Amino acid sequence: MAQNQPFELPKQLRELAEKNVEQVRAAYAQFMDAMTQATSAWSTAPSNVITSGFRDIQELAIRFAKENAEAGFALAKELANAKDIQGVLSLQSRYAQTQIQSYAHQAQELGRLMAEALESMKPRT
């Protein structure tokens, strides 16, 4: 009778996955740098429509997007090194819990900045 041995991902497959994650992270970093430069150029253009409050919101949203992407890349790297299904499930569960808390905080912060920006646009009487 064969013993029940846990499924383990081969080391070569984990190494390949980790290498792919790093390549995607590098490509993403280049994309975000280009996006940040484009956004910066757009937001420094003279405009009566965009107030500094909305620029703050835009910058915060970009920062949150970068943080969330980094969290995703960190998860992918950890998953690439997971040796078995239990490890994968544990990593995914921890990531989901952490990200839910992070998204809630980000939504509160963006909501606060939106309220401030809208308040600053009201005419003073």
Image (cartoon, grey):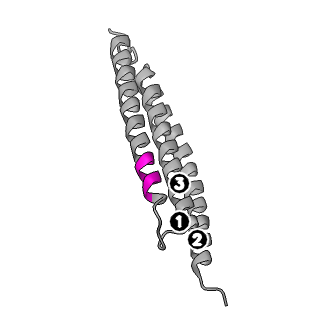
- Label 1 – label 3 distance at C-alpha: 9 Å
Q: Secondary structure at mark 3?
A: helix
Q: Residue at 40% of width from left, 50% of height from top?
A: 38
Amino acid type indicated by mark 2: Ala
Name the residue beneath numbered marker 2: 117
* The C terminus, quarter of image: bottom right
Specify the segment rendered in magenta.
36-42
User: Which of disc 2 and disc 3 is earlier in sequence?
Assistant: 3
Which residue extends farthest top?
1
Name the residue beneath numbered marker 1: 54
Amino acid type indicated by mark 3: Glu
Question: Would residue 31 be visible to someone looking at this image?
Answer: yes
Name the residue beneath numbered marker 3: 59
Numbered disc total? 3
Q: Residues within 10 Å of mark 2 (few under 14, many from 20)?
A: some
* The N terminus, quarter of image: top left
Tell me if label 3 and label 2 are in contact, CB under 8 Å: no
Residue 8 circle label: none
Tell me: residue 21, above or below residue 107. above
Coordinates of residue 110 in the picture (x, y in percent): 56, 61
Q: Secondary structure at mark 2?
A: helix
**Location of residue 8 by image quarter:** top left
